[in-house]
Image (cartoon, rainbow, N blue to C red):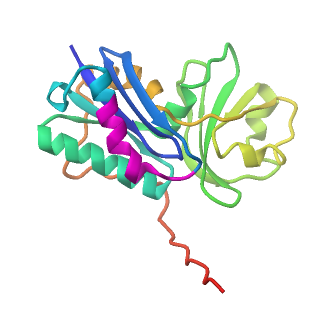
């Protein structure tokens, strides 16, 4: 048996799930259009546990979306996961948030390019094949009309995620398909986490940090007139 709690907070989607042996038994998520994770994450965890008729003592591991993504969202999700692991002496599993996002897409052929917004014309992106095997590692990149041209010349390419929307007017190739309203979800973490749990692919809870990919840059709030 392996009862795993999943937490995904890399985007505006605050998402929690519980699975047993890779099979989803509860999913709770909310996307208000802003980052309400600090207020919503722990209530969602409690609701998922209640729905599953479990307590935190029944959880055998916690899987967290490690990023890349929102600095604040990742900090909240990873801090919650580490705190629960420390308090209950259970292992921590991490999953790339772009891999989680890619799993929301089912295709028969072509490539999947999940994108998470990184402000302005920059995105965090990776490339996966139809079986979710990594074709290209995760990068932070500025999008222009030549982006992913090699992939587009040979494949239908599915762009998805909150970073893909702003690329639709720039990447105009006929093989480009843009998928709206796709976010990383704890629903898609269950198979990956179960595989890692069986193989004991876990993190050092004391030293684990989110996969920010680039340094956090604070923006100064504009003064009100």
Q: Quadrant of residue 21?
A: top left
Total marks in image: 0
Q: Main secondary structure of the magenta part?
A: helix
Indicate the quadrant where residue 3 lies: top left
Q: Is residue 210 visible?
A: no
Residue that appears at 61% across and 80% down: 222
Q: Is residue 2 left or right of residue 190?
A: left
Q: Residue at x 73, y 41 (%)?
A: 148
For the question of whether residue 186 can be seen, the reply is: yes
What quarter of the picture does the N terminus occupy? Answer: top left
Q: Position of residue 99 (x, y in %)?
A: 50, 33
Residue 79 horizontal/vertical position (percent): 29, 51
Of 138 and 56, nearer the camera is: 56
Which quarter shows the C terminus?
A: bottom right
Residue nearer the viewer, 143 or 38: 38
- Horizontally, residue 149 falls left or right of residue 104, namely right
Compared across the picture, whether 19 is left or right of 30 comes to left
> 215 or 83, which lies in front?
83
User: Which range of residues does the magenta coloring cover?
Assistant: 34-47
Residue at 19% over, 31% down: 56
- Expressed as whole percent of the image width and height from the top left, the position of residue 33 reads 59, 48
- Residue 57 x, y percent position in the rendering: 14, 29
- Residue in the picture at 73% in, 52% down: 143
Is residue 186 covered in magenta? no
Does residue 39 belong to the magenta stretch? yes
Residue 156 sits above or below residue 203 on the image: above
């Amino acid at each position: 048996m392996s009862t795993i709690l999943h937490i995904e907070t890399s985007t505006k989607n605050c998402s929690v799930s519980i699975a047993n042996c890779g099979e989803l038994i509860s999913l709770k998520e909310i996307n208000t259009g802003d980052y309400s994770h600090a207020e919503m994450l722990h209530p969602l965890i409690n609701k998922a546990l209640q729905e599953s008729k479990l307590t935190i003592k029944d959880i055998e591991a916690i899987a967290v979306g490690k990023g890349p993504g929102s600095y604040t969202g990742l900090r909240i999700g990873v801090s919650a996961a580490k705190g629960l692991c420390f308090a209950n002496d259970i292992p921590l599993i991490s999953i790339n948030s772009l891999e989680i996002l890619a799993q929301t897409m089912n295709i028969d052929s072509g490539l999947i390019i999940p994108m998470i917004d990184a402000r302005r014309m920059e995105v965090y992106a990776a490339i996966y094949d139809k079986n979710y095997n990594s074709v290209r590692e995760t990068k932070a990149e500025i999008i222009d009309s030549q982006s992913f041209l090699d992939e587009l010349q040979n494949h239908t390419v599915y762009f998805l995620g909150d970073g893909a929307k702003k690329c639709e007017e720039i990447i105009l190739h006929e093989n480009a398909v843009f998928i709206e309203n796709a976010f990383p979800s704890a629903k898609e973490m269950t198979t990956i986490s179960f595989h890692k749990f069986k193989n004991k692919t876990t993190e050092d809870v004391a030293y684990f940090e989110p996969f920010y990919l680039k340094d956090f840059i604070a923006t100064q709030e504009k003064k009100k007139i």
